[in-house]
Image (spheres, grey):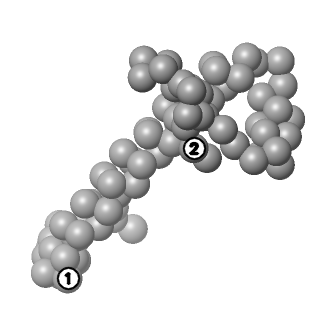
Amino acid sequence: MKVAQKSSASRQTLTITRSAFDVLDRLRGETPKSIFIQNLIEKEKRRREREAFYQSVLAAYTPEVRLETLELNEAIPIAAE
């Protein structure tokens, strides 16, 4: 994908391969192309934000934190049989 050379700076036109265009056309259905692409971009942005959050949470859950959690669970049982 690249920006068409004759596009203005304020409104650039993307060029994609024919096969990518065909897939895009099938996926978008009756939705206008510009709206469909904008929605795809917003979904991907949200997905990447969630992924970054999950990665930061995973990094914070160190082996020490895991051990502390297990010890706390044993000391304070939540459910009794």
Instruction: Tell me residue 28's x, y (percent).
Output: 77, 28
Q: Residue flagged by tag 2: what amino acid is it?
A: Lys
Residue beneath the point at 48% across and 20% down: 8
Q: Is residue 56 rendered to the left or right of residue 46?
A: left
Q: Can residue 58 be seen in this view?
A: yes
Q: In terms of depth relative to the viewer, which is nearer, 60 or 15? A: 15
Q: Are marks 1 and 2 in contact (CB under 8 Å)?
A: no
- Quadrant of the image occupied by residue 29: top right
Find disc 2 in the rendering and name its residue: 2
Q: Residues within 10 Å of mark 2 (few under 14, many from 20)?
A: few
Instruction: Tell me residue 18's x, y (percent).
Output: 82, 45
Question: Tag count in the figure?
Answer: 2
Residue beneath the point at 57% across and 44% down: 2
Q: What element carries label 1?
A: helix
Instruction: Tell me residue 53's x, y (percent).
Output: 31, 52
Residues at marks 1 and 2, CA–CA distance in whole angstroms: 45 Å
Q: Residue flagged by tag 1: what amino acid is it?
A: Pro
Sequence-first disc among 1 and 2: 2
Q: Is residue 22 rendered to the left or right of residue 44?
A: right
Find disc 1 in the rendering and name its residue: 63
Q: In terms of depth relative to the viewer, which is nearer, 69 or 1? A: 1
**Which label lies toward us, 1 or 2?**
2
Instruction: Tell me residue 73's x, y (percent).
Output: 22, 71
Q: In terms of depth relative to the viewer, which is nearer, 67 or 61? A: 61
Q: How crowded is mark 1: few (under 14 residues within 10 Å), some or many (20 or more)?
A: few
